[in-house]
Amino acid sequence: MATPFSSDSDDLRSPLVSSSASLSLEKLGIDEMLHKYCGEFGRWQLKHFVLVSLAWTLVAFHTMVMIFADRQPQWRCLPGPPGSGCDDSATTVCGFRPGSWEWVGGFGSSTVAEWGLVCGDKFKVGLVQSLFFTGCMIGGGIFGHLSDSFLGRKGSLTMVCLLMSILGILTAFSPNYNTYVLLRFLTGISTGGSLSAFVLATEPVGPTKRGPAAMSTFYFFSAGISLLSGIAYVFPTWRALYMASSIPSFLFLILVLIPFTSESPRWYLVRGRIKDAMHLMSTIAASNGNRLPPHVMLALDDETANNDNNEVVITGSLIDAIKSPLTRTHLFLAVAINFSCAVVYYGLSLNVVNLGTNLLANVALNAVAEMPAFTITAVLLNRVGRRWLTIGTLWFGGSFCLVGSVVGNNVGVWRVVTMVCGILGIFGAAGTYNLLYIYTAELFPTVVRNAALGCATQASQVGAILAPFVVVLGGGMPFAVFAMCGIMGGILAFYLPETLNKPLYDTFAGMANGEYGSTLLV
């Protein structure tokens, strides 16, 4: 039997109008419809959330693979006559005569071994990392716009996964360092579009369940880092590692993303595709064991869709977010806070990786250590609120960084204290890092949400680019910089509004008329 949402219906509204004598048309926003009729986080949302969030595991592969591919392997002296110049007790191979030593594992063990990125060329390792994050920054802006405009959330994520797979495989065949740098830069651009996965996974979730669900996306990223350690153990050479960590992106694309995930109903709505949005909402309700009444209709929160065919397309760009007094200040604050948090998170992560312990085990344990932060912030998110939790986690991490800067890298028990300060600093920064995704997304309407989130993500990438340069300062200076960033980020968060249990607005007009519209004007 045909329904008002069936594909063969010529006019979505005609069957609704015919029943107007008994039932008046009820126009609802997506959050209201999810809450009243569809279910905020039922079977459909759970399945969709898990499948889409698997993309974060792949993003972790492409982001953190450099830790293993660009590592400096161990070396050993070769047998030779006395006075050959090689000394096994030395901390560097610089100054040794060529042929007097060799890399353990051979030249194919890492890019450092294959292309001799040591001594005077050691900076090239850091350059690759910085250019990758530079690409992420550019990609965040590009895919943020594409995701909000004609390509959509699912279309953008499809392109991201395809590019990550192709570029990762090509990287495995890099003939020289310059080609490797270029491909890593391009991979960074594609990886920068990964925020589409976050938006696609969370937009169909109801307002009271969205926060904890969004916080859970980062378990997939941390799990990806742990899995990558296992892959690196099985594939110890850097070229094989790039192949093994890139193929899963293509498999995910053809086996999961394309056949089993849906576009965001919010994107359908703001693009004027009301029939598609209504059909998807009906599917969500049915999958959750509910039923969408025939007298219910989706509408934008500013009611601009009230014309004859509901085909109004509402679009926006980052320029609109800057021009609007509703979002201008909050965009600048979100950029500054995301930048500060990234400096702390990536800077402390690099310090922990360079502890001199087993690299595979260390990376895996660091990823696992972040998970309690995700759990605690998810539990507190709907009790404390976004604003105070952001402030608290930033100050928590910044305070321990401040202690670490005072203690310094002394020997004995004080070195242990410094290490503990770094771990607790990462704990706070990791909690803030994933919290900022949901907080930033809730501060902006649907028409510019992905663009604004992309801009904030770009700021994070700038922080990631600068973090390695902070680390090389040595002594207590890195901890001092991290402490300043954490504490200042918490202060800036004071000027953001609370978004707990507030709807995700679709348009600027809807936000202006919303519950905290007056607050946004302050």
Image (cartoon, grey):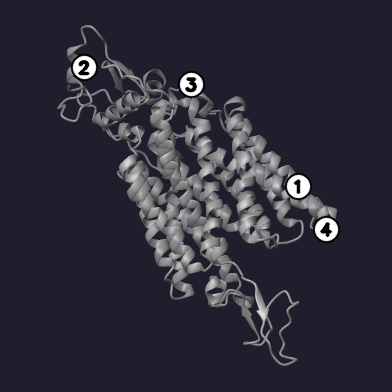
Q: CA distance from mark 4 to mark 3?
A: 53 Å
Nearer the observer: mark 1 or 2; the answer is 2
Residue 99 position, x and y percent, is 62, 87
Q: Secondary structure at mark 3?
A: loop
Labels 2 and 4 touching (C-beta < 8 A)? no
Q: Check disc 3 and give the amino acid type.
A: Glu
* Number of other residues with Cα within 10 Å of mark 2, as a class: few under 14, some 14 to 19, many 20 or more: some
Name the residue at 23% across, 25% down. Answer: 5
Check the image and report above or below for 499 versus 340. above
Question: How far is mark 2 from mark 4, CA to CA?
Answer: 75 Å
Image location of residue 381, percent across then percent down:
58, 30
Q: Nearer the viewer, mark 4 or mark 1?
A: 4
Quadrant position of residue 204? top left
Residue lying at 25% horizontally and 9% vertically, measured from the top left:
23
Residue 450 in sight: no
Mark 1 or mark 3, earlier in chain = 1
Q: What separation in Å lies between label 1 and label 2 (alpha carbons)?
A: 63 Å
- Mark 1 vs mark 3, CA separation in Å: 38 Å
Query: Of callouts 2 and 4, which one flags the residue occurring earlier in the amino acid sequence?
Result: 2
**Badge 3: how crowded within 10 Å, few (<14), some, or many (20+)?**
few
Q: Which residue is mark 1?
A: 402
Left or right for 167, reference 305: right
Of residue 96 and residue 359, the one placed in the foreground of this image is 359
Circle 2 residue = 16
Q: Marks 4 and 1, Cα distance to the nearest angstrom?
A: 15 Å
Of labels 4 and 3, earlier in sequence is: 4
Q: Which residue is mark 3?
A: 515
Give the quadrant of residue 382. top right
Q: State whether residue 474 is above or below residue 518.
A: below
